Image (spheres, helix red, strand yellow):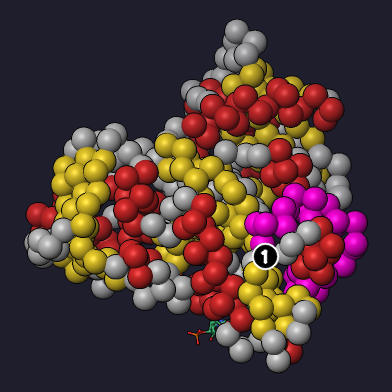
Amino acid sequence: MNVEIRPCRDREELQSYGQVVSYVFSINQDEDMERELQAVEPEWTMCAFVDGRVVSTYGAFPFTVRLNGSPVEMGGVTAVGTLPHHRRKGLLRKTMTAGLHAMHERGQPFGILWASMGAIYQRFGYGLATPHIAYKFDPRNVELLPGQRTPGRCELIESENALEQIRPVQEAYAASRNMVIERPPYLWKMGALRSREKRKVYTAVYRNAAGEVTGYVVYNTREAPRDELGPNQVLEVQDLAWLDLDAYRGLWEFIRSHDLVYEVQIRGLVGEDDPMQELLLEPRMVDKRTVDGVWMRIVDVERGLAARPYREPGALCLEVVDDLLPWNNGRWAFETDGTATTVSRTVREPELTMPVATLATLISGHRGATVLERAGKLEAASMAALRRADRMFATEYAPLTPDDF
Ligand SMILES: CC(C)(COP(=O)(O)OP(=O)(O)OC[C@H]1O[C@@H](n2cnc3c(N)ncnc32)[C@H](O)[C@@H]1OP(=O)(O)O)[C@@H](O)C(=O)NCCC(=O)NCCS
């Protein structure tokens, strides 16, 4: 058995990659797979070829992600799959390792992914970087606290013109956020503006008192009859962005005004700091559910630590343990004025010691150092170091990755 690990060479090999991906992820319509492949370049893939045939796949989109407001290059890992009769023979370990080396060569200090199962990726040094929060509610039960009026108004806009009106809002929204992808055209097309079930997609914008668009919601609706009498529709929000609280409240009221809807679903579009919990008369009625979201792998500790802004100036000495990418191992001295950060190797005693996966969680702002220490995920030489790390690594916004990829 001859095993070769390498990217696809051309679009013809990419078709074979597509066949494995269709099988593994049950993409039954050829046209759906074709559309997905249009967004992929052969050189972004890493495959295992067994006797000349693709049997294991991996891809990595070249994303720019706002890390605490700063644009950072990240590989968006996708399409990880091995055909059943080739599983548990170490092929993913080979493609994953080669893929992380390729990111390193490209200068991408991080890789991110949505996992079908966290267990697959934690062993490769991925740490949790965002939560996935879902709301599911009856619009009649989510009234805002009294006295909250919006000076603007919402309106439905034509789908053909939607992107040009809402893209500037999404870009402004993303710019200061944490873990939001700078959305390339294919993520708009394949994700935010597309209904996977091929439903009609609507866009409503919020205009403030001056007539400027300061928020939008993209959604679909469907008839979903149930036993109870009354409203019989479900409204699924596909994308949502707002530039201020007025816009957010206005959009919420717009969603609530769908009289024939008995269930609104908002999945993966808000972070832990979503203001909604503060705005509602009955917060529990959004039926909030939180699971693991995006996992992040630090490909290059030195560049990764320097890539993001910090909440306050300070210095820390870290020891990092990485059993897959040897250049990350060792002691790192890092010093920041909040914006500019220098990172260098040191022989000093570490103040914090952790596996590379824990550092990913810390850098993303998903969990603070003290919480991680209490969970046994890092060791601290002193309480002072732990508290300093809490303050330095805190992010302006809670991490959130609204895009699926
Ligand atoms: C997950 C998948 C890609 C693994 O591929 P594979 O080629 O069999 O993986 P490997 O043999 O290289 O295994 C790599 C490691 O992951 C572990 N692993 C593999 N699949 C796992 C799973 N489903 N759960 C937990 N651990 C898993 C292996 O035990 C192995 O550990 P080790 O290297 O420490 O011994 C394959 O099972 C698959 O295609 N699954 C269905 C699709 C899927 O879930 N893809 C992930 C999408 S995000």
Residue 289 seen in render: no
Q: Is residue 39 magenta?
A: yes
Where residue 178 appears, as percent x and y from the top left, is 44, 42
> Of all residues shown, which one is farthest toward the bottom?
1
Q: Residue at x 43, y 60 (%)?
A: 299
Q: Residue at x 64, y 19 (%)?
A: 213
- The 10 Å Cα crowd at callout 1, few under 14, some 14 to 19, many 20 or more, is many
Residue 217 seen in render: yes
Report the side of 84 relative to 347 (left or right). right
Q: Nearer the viewer, residue 220 or 167?
A: 167
Residue 337 position (above or below residue 17): above
Q: Is residue 36 magenta?
A: yes
Quarter of the picture holding the N terminus: bottom right
Which residue, given by chain and number where applicable, does mark 1 sit on? 7
Residue 209 position (above or below residue 350): above
Q: Quadrant of residue 181?
A: top right
Give the magenta part as a residue range.
19-45
Report the side of 389 relative to 172 (left or right). left
Quarter of the picture holding the C terminus: bottom right
Q: Residue at x 78, y 73 (%)?
A: 20
Q: Main secondary structure of the magenta part?
A: helix
Where residue 343 appears, as percent x and y from the top left, is 24, 49
Helix, strand or loop at mark 1? loop
Residue 158 position (above or below residue 362): above
Q: Image quadrant of ligand 1? A: bottom right
